[in-house]
Image: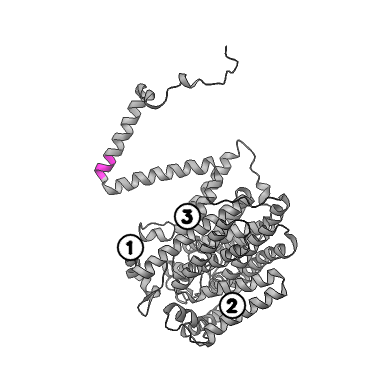
Amino acid sequence: MSAFPDHINPFEVNSGSNRFQNLSTIVMVLLISLLVTLGIVKTGLIGVVGIIGLIVVVALLYMVFRNPRSGIILLIVSGFFVTGVARYIPAPWGLSIDGLLVLIYLALFFKGFGKKIPWDKAKSPLTLVVTIWMGYIFLQIANPEAQSLEAWFYAMRGVALYQWLSVPLLFVLFNRSKDLNTFFIIWGILSVIGTLKGFQQFHFGVDPFEQRWLDQGGAQTHVLFGKLRVFSFYSDAGQFGASQAHTGVVFGILALFKKGNLKLKTFFACVALAGFFGMLISGTRGAIAVPALGGIMFLILKKNVRVLILGGVFLIAAYIFFAHTTIGQGNAEIRRMRTAFDPNEASLQVRLENQKKLKGYLASRPMGGGVGATGNWGQRFTPHTFLANTATDSWYVMVWADTGIIGLTYYLLMLFFILGTGAYYVMYKLKDDWLKVQISALVCGMAGIMMASYGNGVFGQMPTGILMYVGMVFMFISPQLDKTGQKDTIRLH
């Protein structure tokens, strides 16, 4: 008897073509081949696409169930492409985010039979505040002003559900210094791809599928005075511009303070430049708020009088350039950005007028008109109502109209609590220099997005939403990462 009963002699195992000596294997392979062939013959190209899609889905299911952490990576990647792909293959792709989140939870549930899942890592003030917010949104079902349960279902996902489901998963699965490094690399690569796609639209024009989207109504907001507002593969130009500005701020800070790794520093710098270029060609005026407030937040975090003065001078110079000069006026992108500094600009006056109307309407409705009462969901499910026909434009105005002054107050307090916690850790608790830079970048990026969300509804849309949720979690676990003493191990090859 062998001294190693569990040892398998490779020469005694059938592999490769030897396995086809088994009749049942041959029959199974032939049967599958026959079914695939019949499917292609009967359905043509649709059948091929369907079979490829089925194979991809099965592979993804296997990957997530085998390693739930890979589901987080997939979630980040999906956030970038989930809206744009609908222009090429019409389908409710947004629901794939819901399905992926549920799939990760299912994978953890089954993993729990074999080993203990460390759910205790999700015990955090962040989990608490987003749960309270989700609870309030759930109670909106009973709002007497709400007129559509369907509108609530679709709208509450971006407002609260994705955040509520994502935060615990991130605490449990995506919580190491290595994960933070991976997050930045994935974010950077996808953002550069987004800018390249945007440049293709800017310089060469849109493709036939994007043209169809414009012809079906997108041109009303994306072709102004004969000039295309670039949207890349994002949901719209507003999201593209703000997201790229967000990338520019975060990666600009990383590039400035990265030491000892020239390849990585160069990568960060290239991503930052691509981000700011994407912001510029998007034609989105509100996106300029991201580097503006992100820069101010950075100066505060540095706690350095000299840096504060220099940064203040730079910000004042930028303001003077846009608000009080005509330099670069021949450039359409600069000209459009400059209108953001004009207090008499026509669209701003329309927004202010709409807000006055909403103020009167909501004065007697402290819980708002119901989640999904405004915007696209309102137009789709309750087109006859006042809120559905009053443009909100702003993310915060939308939250106010949908959830009332109660909801808006709590929502803003929650965001400032999260931002303040991250800033406090950077300024007073974190000791590791590189970790402090990373969290500073996330805090400044979040501050910029919070500001930009007043002008556009960017906060709850993808990919900004998932980038925010990941950033929030790393802000809250940064003290634990600091204590472990884990250093920067990321490498580019």
- 353 w.r.t. 184: above or below: below
Q: Is residue 40 magenta?
A: yes
Q: Earlier in the sequence, mark 1 or mark 3?
A: 3
Span highlighted in magenta in the image: 38-42
Identify residue type, mark 2.
Answer: Ser
Q: Is residue 193 magenta?
A: no
Is the magenta region chiefly helix, strand or loop?
Answer: helix
- 373 w.r.t. 57: above or below: below
SS state under label 2 = loop
Horizontally, is 142 left or right of 44 in the view? right
Q: Earlier in the sequence, mark 2 or mark 3?
A: 3
Q: Nearer the viewer, residue 287 or 92?
A: 287
Residue 25 position within the rendered picture, expressed as x and y whole percent measured from the top left: 37, 26
Task: Kindly check if marks 1 and 3 are in contact, taking CB atoms under 8 A apart as contact.
Answer: no
SS state under label 3 = helix
Residue 273 position within the rendered picture, expressed as x and y whole percent measured from the top left: 51, 67
The N terminus is located in which quarter? top right
Q: Residue at x 28, y 48 (%)?
A: 45
Q: Dot 3 surroundings within 10 Å: few (below 14), some, or many (20 or more)?
A: many
Residue 477 position within the rendered picture, expressed as x and y whole percent measured from the top left: 68, 55
Q: Is residue 354 visible?
A: yes
Q: Dot 1 surroundings within 10 Å: few (below 14), some, or many (20 or more)?
A: some
**Mark seen at residue 209:** 1
Q: Single out the residue that lies furthest toward the right.
A: 428
The residue to which callout 2 is attached is: 364
Q: Nearer the viewer, residue 58 or 176?
A: 176
**Mark seen at residue 78:** 3
Residue 275 position within the rendered picture, expressed as x and y whole percent measured from the top left: 50, 66
**Mark seen at residue 273:** none
How much space separates mark 1 and mark 2, taking CA atoms? 45 Å
1 or 2: mark nearer the eye: 1
